[in-house]
Amino acid sequence: MRWRVAILVSTAIAISYLDRQTLPVAVQAITRDIPLSNGQFSALQSAFLFSYALMYAGGGKLVDFLGTRRGFTVIMAFWSLACASHALATGFVMLAASRFLLGVGEGGGFPAATRAVAEWFPTTERATAMGIVNAGTAVGAVMAPPLIATVLGYTNWRWIFVLTGGMGVIWAAWWRLSYATPRVAPGQTDAVETPVLPPDSTPALPWIQLLRIRETWGLVAAKFLSDAAWYFYLFWLPKYLYDARGFDIKAVGTFAWMPSAAAGFGCLLGGTFSSYLLRRQFSLGVARKVALGLSAALMPFVILVPHVPVSWAIAIFCLAYFGQQSWSTLVMVLPVDLFPASVVGSVAGLVGFGGAMGGIVFGEVIGYLLDHGFSYVAVFNIAGTLHIGAFLIVLAAIPVLLPLSLERKLSYGSVQ
């Protein structure tokens, strides 16, 4: 049953990435009706990421309060309707409002997914399960270019948002009818009804308390840097292919799915490799950090993208997407490894908030650079260094990766 839950949650994440990719992939068709500069395109992504950041943090609290089943239902239904609302836009302001609302809904998706993994999987299987869940990002991103190109071949861009929003509404109904909290702890096979998230002595804590803990800050800062690069790849790859490589919508539909497919393998292999190391009796810290370090080591190759033929550029994007999503899978499971169940959703929300804010800051920098005479070379040079910095922060902030005693951590008067 728990693996069916992982696939169900992965489907939701796939829909979320399909929804957020609709505008970047269809931007060439949209600009025929609603002209957009590079700065305005950045602003649309910032509108999404700003509300996404706020709701990523708030979504963790919401899921902790409502529970996984009800919380995920509300979150999915809201973002699906927000996605469909893009079809009504007649100008930049309306597009920005729809992007903002989409971010409000999607921000709760990964905190809900993290809590579902915590409810259903033991420590030795969590990285693998999170890899399956995170593979949904690749499925959604793979679907977007060919699906949107096909839809645009028969009708206008507005129907894309109606179609993708409808998928989410169907999933929300499916989730509501099929999900239930497990009756035994992760990994047990008997019928003893022990809570799947065992009670701990730590009550739900406010964010200000969680932010006094060094490990929280480390995860937030690492996610800030790594997601700054990730959102550049995710939102700007189609536009880069349009602007710098002369692609049209058919060419984007033919080739732009390939990096996302590689990302799916990264999700699965990163988590599976870490779980393999655990089964080989390596410590939790070694299992997570070795996999994180190998993932980060792949990312500087993107610096070469503007200097090579387009076929090699696509191959390098595939490598970068693979490394990023291997990295992301492991970073997402660290809150479950470190923190008590009562605060997992809240910590995951703060970490996601940091990632979205990184996407906003770097996205605005990209728009400014491109509108003021700089080329994509400068952008790729910056993006290629961010994961290395994020890995160094993880090493410094989490020297020993073991479940934390928050009572001891918070007994000190400063960040520990």
Image: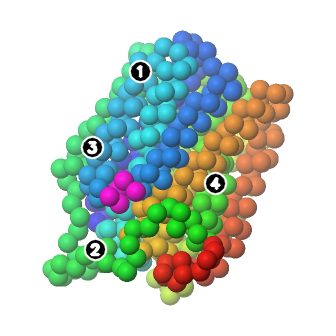
Per the model, the C-alpha gap separating discs 1 and 3 is 21 Å
- Secondary structure state at the residue bearing disc 4: helix
Nearest to the eye among marks 4 and 1: give it: 4
The residue sitting at 28% across, 74% down in the picture is 196
The residue wearing badge 1 is 87
Q: Which mark is residue 278?
A: none
Given the image, on which type of amino acid does mark 3 rest? Answer: Ala
* Circle 3 Cα neighbour tier, 10 Å, few/some/many (<14 / 14–19 / ≥20): many
The residue segment tinted magenta is: 61-65
Per the model, the C-alpha gap separating discs 4 and 2 is 31 Å
Q: Position of residue 98 (x, y in %)?
A: 46, 28
- Identify the image quadrant of residue 398: bottom right
**Label whose residue precedes the other's in the sequence (4 or 1):** 1
The residue wearing badge 2 is 196
Contact (Cβ within 8 Å) of mark 4 with mark 2? no
The residue wearing badge 4 is 224
State yes or no: residue 47 in magenta.
no
Given the image, on which type of amino acid does mark 1 rest? Answer: Ala
Q: Which mark is residue 172?
A: 3
The C terminus lies in quadrant? bottom right
| Residue 266 shows in this picture | no
Per the model, the C-alpha gap separating discs 2 and 3 is 23 Å
Q: Is residue 197 above or below residue 86?
A: below
**Label whose residue precedes the other's in the sequence (1 or 3):** 1
- Secondary structure state at the residue bearing disc 3: helix
- Secondary structure state at the residue bearing disc 1: helix
* Circle 4 Cα neighbour tier, 10 Å, few/some/many (<14 / 14–19 / ≥20): many
Contact (Cβ within 8 Å) of mark 1 with mark 3? no
Given the image, on which type of amino acid does mark 2 rest? Answer: Val
